[in-house]
Amino acid sequence: MNMLATTIGGRTFNNCMMNAAGVRCQNKRDLDALVQSDAGAYVTKSATPQKRAGNPSPRMHTLPHGSINSMGLPNNGLDYYLNYVIADQQKRPGTTNFLSVAGTSLADNLAMLHQIQASEYTGFVELNLSCPNVPGKPQVGYDFDRVHTVLDQVFEFYTKPLGVKLPPYFDLVHFDQIAAILNQYPLTFVNSINSIGNALVVDPQSEQVVIRPKGGYGGIGGASVKPTALANVRGLALRLKPEIAIVGTGGILNGVDVFEHILCGASMVQIGTQFGYEGIPLFDRLAKELTDIMKQKGYTSIDDFRGKLKTFD
Ligand code: DOR
């Protein structure tokens, strides 16, 4: 068995690393490149029911330790991505990928999930409850009652494998509260974390913000979010029922970062900012780096160390 293989919801992936939604996955060319790559799977750009232009530019900015973005969900609409994943499923039966959806209302999410339920798609859906960048639309993941309502209504009819993409939480009581809600549903996975939303980056030279939307507020990704991401992966891994796998996202630049996410409990990891900077060769590099670490430590599968982080007590 491949050393880097992982299993989620009964589906096996031969590599536990993939892109994070939003980065280099918006059109067919990007997705075809991911299919050809060493990534274990791909996720499509979060879809809304119709094609969307997103926020005005500049809407992304490189930082010394990551990135800030306020893209505002530019995407080609659900039909585009659903057609893509179905065609891919027909070409490569037995492979599983992730279709991300991010309605800006509950009605939009339910309509999209009804369409997916009725389609021949059998892969994973990642329901994005954590986009920080649509003006006037708060992140659902911070409103626990709302998360409850959304999942109640989704699981009234949706029977295919589904996970949720969560925002980062910053207090242990919030880990308790969100896990208590998520544990009530037949979720296949949770993905933690989306970008750290509504941060503000200031350019002291120009005395200006660095991105246009929302007065300069945007989501932070990349190296600086790793400790927050690990805290969320670990916090959820300790609280969720074992049937719900954790997808770890945030701050992955190298094999050590992947190793740490898995130690904290991730079964799969996603890479956003660094994939944006490095492109497809990232996956081959990370696979080599993680394999080297595992060999040095005598591990032959990620299950040998997944979730086995040691603490002092
Ligand atoms: O940081 C993010 N940017 N997270 C999302 O969920 C959506 C994306 C965007 O399009 O703004």
Image (spheres, grey):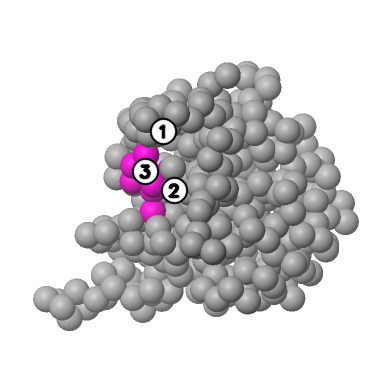
> Which three-letter amino acid code belongs to the residue tagged 3?
Val
At x 45%, y 29%, the residue is 298
Residue 209 visible to an observer of this rendering: yes
Residue 55 is tagged as: none
Q: Quadrant of the N terminus?
A: top right
3 and 2 marks in contact (CB < 8 Å): yes
Specify whether residue 193 is in view. Answer: no
In the picture of the structure, the residue carrying the numbered disc 2 is: 260
The residue located at (55%, 57%) in the rendering is 234
Q: Residue at x 15, y 78 (%)?
A: 204
Mark 1 vs mark 3, CA separation in Å: 12 Å
Label number found at residue 297: 1
Q: Earlier in the sequence, mark 1 or mark 2?
A: 2
Q: Position of residue 164 (x, y in %)?
A: 65, 55
> Where does the magenta region start and end?
251-258
Element on which disc 3 rests: helix
Give me the residue at 69% from left, 35% from top: 123
* Element on which disc 1 rests: helix
Q: Nearer the viewer, residue 49 or 33?
A: 33
The percent coordinates of residue 110 (x first, y second) are: 76, 57
Kindly state the secondary structure of the residue where label 2 is placed.
helix
Q: Is residue 308 left or right of residue 239?
A: left
Rounded to the nearest whole Å, what is the CA distance between mark 1 and mark 2?
Answer: 14 Å
Q: Reply above or below: 186 against 301.
A: below
The number of discs equals 3
Say whether residue 53 is magenta. Answer: no
- The residue under label 3 is 256
Residue 251, image x, y percentages:
39, 54
Q: Which of marks 3 and 1 precedes in the sequence?
A: 3
